[in-house]
Image (cartoon, rainbow, N blue to C red):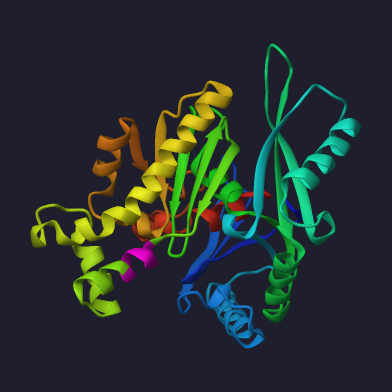
């Protein structure tokens, strides 16, 4: 499922809210082999700016990173974050492929809060009822302005976008497998948090929340009288621990964490009500998911298995880089998933 694609070897490039990450793979015997990877920090939220000057700054960072990481192709697979697209799942009766295409266009017009001429549409059948043959179809609509901004950014970086998809699809590709049970992936980023329900390797429910690690830092700075740097240090050092600083850091962040956990529970219930499936495991990824005691907190609240995802599970690599890859695993899920697209 992609907004557009061309078949050829690509480098996966994830432009996040605070960093750019690149991954290039080559064909391997059992798994694709890691041939190059790297990351570079960018000023917070610079990538969200619509200023051409800011776009050029990000493009320059990408250009330097691909050179320093020894990337050998100009062809890029990249992703739009969930916050930049509209996603809906509709139920349709059994029908032919041509009828389905027409039905999807009609449903998109009814469910997408933008003019159909202003968006690029993609869709995928995510579930078929074995008894009634009723179809569940995920429709993704990306505003053309967002797509054009991505194309402009990589054109400035002297690279060619050959594949564009959503971050949830890419992340699911790196963290799940077709034989996995019904799982939910929580991508806890800097400026946003994305929830994806994945069944048999297929993303079938997506929610995007406009809160992330930056919001936790801001609320700590405001409520505890800290500057941004101190607040970030407190967040990383104390997390959700009740034993440190009389639990003040945890208490201050809990309302924001509660917004996320409420949405996790709503999404689980929605999926169970709609399809009868029960989420069995929560997979954490994203830089902000490293919050101290987050795993134990979610386990006790949700009563299901909670684990950190390993972005490199489906990739072969030299033993000498294992430790380095392990340290950055939570931040590379999207870039790895993008690179896996053509492998």
The reply to whether residue 240 is visible in this rendering is yes
Which of the 4 image quarters holds residue 55?
A: bottom right
**Membership of 214 in magenta stretch:** yes
Dominant secondary-structure state across the stretch colored magenta: helix
| 194 and 41: which is toward the camera | 194
Question: Residue at left 54%, top 64%?
Answer: 36
Residue at 67% x, 19% y is 129
Q: Quadrant of the N terminus?
A: top right
Establish if 212 lies above or below 200: below
Q: Residue visible at 80% across and 47% down? A: 109
Rendered location of residue 221, percent (x, y): 26, 73
Left-right relation of 83 to 148: left
Image x and y of residue 3, in percent? 75, 53
Task: Please report the residue visible at 47 percent of the width from the left and 30 percent of the height from the top.
Answer: 269
How many numbered dots are placed on residues in this image?
Answer: 0
Give 227 or 169, whichever is nearer the viewer.
227
Name above or below for residue 159 compared with residue 205: below
Residue 291 coordinates in the image, percent (x, y): 28, 56
Question: What are the residue bounds of the magenta stretch?
Answer: 213-218
């Amino acid at each position: 499922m992609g907004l557009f694609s061309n078949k050829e070897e690509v480098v996966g490039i994830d432009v996040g809210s605070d960093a750019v990450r690149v991954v290039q793979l080559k064909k391997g015997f059992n798994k694709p082999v890691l041939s190059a990877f790297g990351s570079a920090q960018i000023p917070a939220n610079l990538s969200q700016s619509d200023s051409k000057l800011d776009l050029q700054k990000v493009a320059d960072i990408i250009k330097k990173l691909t050179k320093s990481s020894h990337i050998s192709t100009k062809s890029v697979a990249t992703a739009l974050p969930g916050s930049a697209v509209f996603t809906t799942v509709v139920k349709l009766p059994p029908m032919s492929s041509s009828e389905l295409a027409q039905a999807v266009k009609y449903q998109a017009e009814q469910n997408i809060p933008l003019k159909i001429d202003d968006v690029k549409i993609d869709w995928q059948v995510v579930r078929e009822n074995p008894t009634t043959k009723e179809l569940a179809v995920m429709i993704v609509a990306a505003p053309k302005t967002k797509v054009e901004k991505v194309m402009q950014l990589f054109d400035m970086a002297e690279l060619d976008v050959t594949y564009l998809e959503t971050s949830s699809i890419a992340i699911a590709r790196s963290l799940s497998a077709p034989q996995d049970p019904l799982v939910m992936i929580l991508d806890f980023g800097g400026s946003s948090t994305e929830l994806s329900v994945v069944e048999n390797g297929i993303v079938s429910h997506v929610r995007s929340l406009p809160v992330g690690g930056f919001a936790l830092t801001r609320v700590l700075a405001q409520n505890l009288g800290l500057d941004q740097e101190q607040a970030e240090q407190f967040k990383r050092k104390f997390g959700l621990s009740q034993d440190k600083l009389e639990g003040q850091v945890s208490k201050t962040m809990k309302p924001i964490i509660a917004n996320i956990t409420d949405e996790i529970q709503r999404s689980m219930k929605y999926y169970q009500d709609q399809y009868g499936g029960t989420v069995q495991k929560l997979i954490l990824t994203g830089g902000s998911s490293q919050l101290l005691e987050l795993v134990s907190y979610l386990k006790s609240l949700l009563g299901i298995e909670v684990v950190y995802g390993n972005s490199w599970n489906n990739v072969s690599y030299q033993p000498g880089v294992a430790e380095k890859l392990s340290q950055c695993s939570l931040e590379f899920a999207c870039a790895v998933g993008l690179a896996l697209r053509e492998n």
